[in-house]
Image: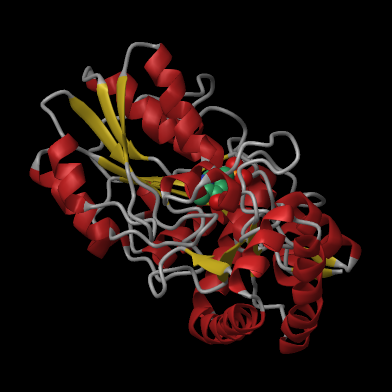
Amino acid sequence: MIYFDNAATTAVSPAVRDAMLPYFANNFGNPSSIFYSLGSDAKREMENARKTVAECLGCDSKEIYFTASGSEADNWAIKGVALKSGKKHIITSAIEHHAVLHTCEFLEKQGYRVTYLPVDSDGLVSPADLENAITDDTALVSIMYANNEIGTIQPIKELCDVAHKKGVPFHTDAVQAVGTLPINLQDLGVDMLSLSAHKFHGPKGIGALYIKKGTKIERLIHGGGQEKGMRAGTENTAYIIGLAKALSDATANMETKTAHIKRLRDKLVKGILDAVPYTILNGHAEKRLPGNANFSFRYIEGEGMLLHLALSGFAVSSGSACASASLDPSHVLLAIGLPHEIAHGSLRISLGAENTEEEVDAFLETLPPIIEKLRAMSPLYEDVLRKEN
Ligand SMILES: *Cc1c(COP(=O)(O)O)cnc(C)c1O
């Protein structure tokens, strides 16, 4: 199988696995049991991991809180600030991950008002739109760093400055960005940032929320005093250590890795656009994640294409919110203005450092005949060809 779905998840790297293994076996101590070395060693290594994460992101280690996922970090940032602030209005964008969108929809049912900012055809949020949406009652702005479907990277620093000028705290879901793009929290200025280890070769089920000192936020998980009393639950030492190892490896190799991934992505994009007519590349031409390519092929139906690709050994994604359970096209593709029928024929390829040029070449040989075959069955496409001739 050729794995082209790195935006969905990545494999745990051997180095990360090796760093984690001792904490399932001999080093199994509870970091809160600090009166004997088994516990205090675990505590020390966990705090070292926190320091590593803070160094990679340019913040203080006291500002890093470990969570069980990127989804939990998003939930905590949004509900936690909403509950604490007393204000009843939240601003987000129309293209967020469901961890943000469904959290906002939940808060709407609790009596909050939510503004879903539109995006342009490249998927960018406008700072002017944000400025116009802020009111005296705005508790929080939450806008994602980079989109998981179309790869578009937002002008986060600029958007954050707009919110801060009006005294409103700013959260960013950076799950697709951390480990892939250089991030310095000192420069960025956001109040909260979510990340998740399994998107950068760490394990699934561990994430973190950066909370800038002084941010007013309520806890979500009540119980013991872990995470400075802000998130109860015995810490997942092995996974925390895995997250830190994965992030420091990703940060150390970022430039070489990005150059390799980008070169493959650009070859793939050019190859597809040259070979397959009536194809749209979704997302911003330059401001996009290095591994992301998202296409819409007109006059075909997405599920058929995914099935053919799977049978040919490619793991890819429809780019739609939920390819299996729902036939609704992706909210992201609709938000950038694609009509339903075009959004249905969409494909997301997300490359990682392990992918090779041979794999891209194999894909460029496999996809065009699949599209041709599917289009040959489409009465719409027949009309198009007839009109052309
Ligand atoms: C994967 C992802 C999440 C969810 O992270 P989990 O750790 O899988 O819960 C949230 N936001 C974005 C943008 C993502 O890509």
Q: Quadrant of the N terminus?
A: bottom right
Colour setup of the view = secondary structure
303 sits to left or right of 110: right
| Res 379 quadrant in image | bottom right
Residue at the far right: name it: 311
Task: Residue 221 in the image: state x and y as whole percent.
Answer: 51, 23
Q: Residue at x 51, y 41 (%)?
A: 331
Residue located at (59% from left, 47% from top): 341
Q: Is residue 37 left or right of residue 256?
A: right
Numbered label tally: 0
Asked if residue 357 is positioned above or below residue 313 in the image, the reply reads below
Please indicate whether residue 215 sits to the left or right of residue 58 in the image: left
Q: Report whether residue 335 is seen.
A: yes
Instruction: Give coordinates of residue 264: x percent, y percent.
Output: 62, 84
Near-viewer residue (239 or 13): 13
Please report the residue visible at 20 percent of the width from the left and 43 percent of the height from the top. 130
Front one among 352 and 198: 352
**Residue in the image at 44% along x and 53% along y:** 174
Q: Quadrant of the C terminus?
A: bottom right
The percent position of residue 242, horizontal first and vertical second, equals 65, 58
